[in-house]
Amino acid sequence: MEDVMLAIVWTAFFAAIFLGWYFYIKARNKERMALIERDKDVSEIYARPKREIRFYFPWLKLGIIFTGFSFGWLVAFGAVEFGIDKREIQEEPLIFGVIFLFTAISIIVAYFVDRPKNK
């Protein structure tokens, strides 16, 4: 029963995406046909802006953040295995605390590394 519901949800999801795309294309075509019937210049309306929009994916920031996360993971588990007395401190809060600390430090470093590019 659970598999059937999952299949229905996925089918509905893809049907919604397809129908949204279909009706968008249909409305755009209707609009263009109405403009052509009234002898309007369609090329001016649908002309691309002269300014190029470039997509920038922050690979450097992501790399710094993942490096900080991994380094925090290694330090946390190294501290648990080699550095702390297991009778005095709980391991889980230490592990998560160190991981989040190093990840936060790496996010701050990534911000300062990428800041001159944004200006």
Image (spheres, helix red, strand yellow):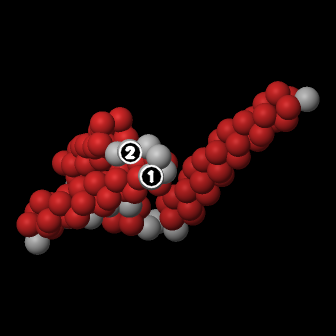
Task: Name the spot of residue 101 as percent of width and height, x first.
Answer: 32, 58
Task: Name the spot of residue 105 as percent of width and height, x first.
Answer: 24, 60
The secondary structure type at the circle numbered 2 is loop
Inspect the image, locate mark 1, and give the three-letter code of the amino acid beneath it. Answer: Glu
Residue that appears at 60% across and 47% down: 21
Inspect the image, locate mark 2, and give the three-letter code of the amino acid beneath it. Answer: Asp
Depth check, front residue: 68 or 25: 68
Q: Which residue is mark 2?
A: 85
User: Would residue 113 appear left or right of 52 to someone viewing this image?
Assistant: left
CB within 8 Å, label 1 to label 2: yes
Q: Quadrant of the N terminus?
A: top right
The secondary structure type at the circle numbered 1 is loop
Residue 53, quarter of the rendered image:
bottom left
Q: Quadrant of the C terminus?
A: bottom left
Q: Is residue 32 visible?
A: yes
Q: Residue furthest left?
A: 116
Task: Name the spot of residue 54 as percent of width and height, x first.
Answer: 23, 55
Residue that appears at 8% across and 66% down: 116
User: Would residue 58 appear left or right of 6 to someone viewing this image?
Assistant: left
Q: Residue furthest right?
A: 1
Q: Which residue is mark 1?
A: 88
Depth check, front residue: 10 or 68: 68
Residue that appears at 72% across and 36% down: 10
Residue that appears at 46% across and 65% down: 39
Marks 1/2: CA–CA distance:
6 Å
Q: Is residue 59 visible?
A: no
Label 2 Cα neighbours within 10 Å, binned few <14 / some 14-19 / many ≥20? few
Task: Name the spot of residue 27 as percent of width and height, x first.
Answer: 61, 57
User: Does residue 7 sit above or below 79 in this rendering?
Assistant: above
